[in-house]
């Protein structure tokens, strides 16, 4: 069978929920034999045509296959495809992902892993700043999932260990964070409504998104 038969258009032929069920039933041997890619899976799915728990079920199946040695980890999904899934997902679908502790960590880890790719070197060349992120409902100290981003020397690095004093600490729910980075929420509105809490340099926090080139769906 020619490789082109495994494109997003071909695998997108089943109804969306049938397609999710097909991926859930797939074992590692079948996934390897199909040459299916995680980006093709992502392109074939429109979250708007799925139920509340279908997207989390799909991501769970992808994670299971990746753990079994199939090269379908979220890190292999293109920025545009990943951004589209998040942008088109409903609030209920995102909440379904975030209540699953393993999926929550996998998605947040992947977003922060990509930050280094999307920083704008021209805007951070002479900057040194540390940002601490705290996500409510987490398993870490104080009930938060924590990430540290260090912008220095034109690059952005990420750690889960808080190793430096932060210029700003940002606290919000993972759901609001996903909405924010997918342009489905406004940072000033989230701040004014108390959904984002900022401690430290407020002016720097207000311009933080401008330091990154966020992928468009």
Image (cartoon, grey):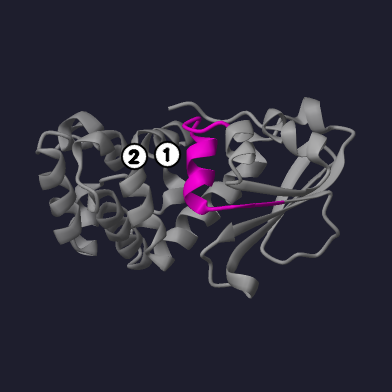
Hey, which quadrant is residue 17 in on the image? top left
Q: Secondary structure at mark 1?
A: helix
Residue occupying the point 53% across, 67% down = 138
Image quadrant containing the N terminus? top left
Q: Which mark is residue 82?
A: 1
**Picture layout, residue 14 above or below residue 136:** above
Residue occupying the point 19% across, 53% down = 23
Q: Pinpoint residue 39: horizontal percent, then vertical percent.
A: 35, 40
Image quadrant containing the C terminus? top left
Q: Residues within 10 Å of mark 2 (few under 14, many from 20)?
A: many
Along the horizontal axis of the image, is 6 left or right of 132? left
Marked residue nearer the N-terminal end (2 or 1) = 1
Q: Which residue is mark 2?
A: 89
Along the horizontal axis of the image, is 132 left or right of 49? right
Q: Pinpoint residue 145: horizontal percent, then vertical percent.
A: 59, 64
Q: Pinpoint residue 202: horizontal percent, then vertical percent.
A: 79, 39
Hey, which quadrant is residue 128 in on the image? top right
Q: Is residue 42 magenta?
A: no
Q: Secondary structure at mark 2?
A: loop
Q: Pinpoint residue 59: horizontal percent, then vertical percent.
A: 32, 54
Q: CA distance from mark 2 to mark 1?
A: 11 Å
Q: Nearer the viewer, residue 162 or 1?
A: 162
Indicate which label's residue lies in the foreground, 2 or 1. Answer: 2
Q: Residues within 10 Å of mark 1 (few under 14, many from 20)?
A: many
Taking the view exactly as shown, the residue that stands out farthest to the front is 193
Q: What is the magenta range?
A: 170-186
- Is any part of residue 46 visible from this angle? no
């Amino acid at each position: 069978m020619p490789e082109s038969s495994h494109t997003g258009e071909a695998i997108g032929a089943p109804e969306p929920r049938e397609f999710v069920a097909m991926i859930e039933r797939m074992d590692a041997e079948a996934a390897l034999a199909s040459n299916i890619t995680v980006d093709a899976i992502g392109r074939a799915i429109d979250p708007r045509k799925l139920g509340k728990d279908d997207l989390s079920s799909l991501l769970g199946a992808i994670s299971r296959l990746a753990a079994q040695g199939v090269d379908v980890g979220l890190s292999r999904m293109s920025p545009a495809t990943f951004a589209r899934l998040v942008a088109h997902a409903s609030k209920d679908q995102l909440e379904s992902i975030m209540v699953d502790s393993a999926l929550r960590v996998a998605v947040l880890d992947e977003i922060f892993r990509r930050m280094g790719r999307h920083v704008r070197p021209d805007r951070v060349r002479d900057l040194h700043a540390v940002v601490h992120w705290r996500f409510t409902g987490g398993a870490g100290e104080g009930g938060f999932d924590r990430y540290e981003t260090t912008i220095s020397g034109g690059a952005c690095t990420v750690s889960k260990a808080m190793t430096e004093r932060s210029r700003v600490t940002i606290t919000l729910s993972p759901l609001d964070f996903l909405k924010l980075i997918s342009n489905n929420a406004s940072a000033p509105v989230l701040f004014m409504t108390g959904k984002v809490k900022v401690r430290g340099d407020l002016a720097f926090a207000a311009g933080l998104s401008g330091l990154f080139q966020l992928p468009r769906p």
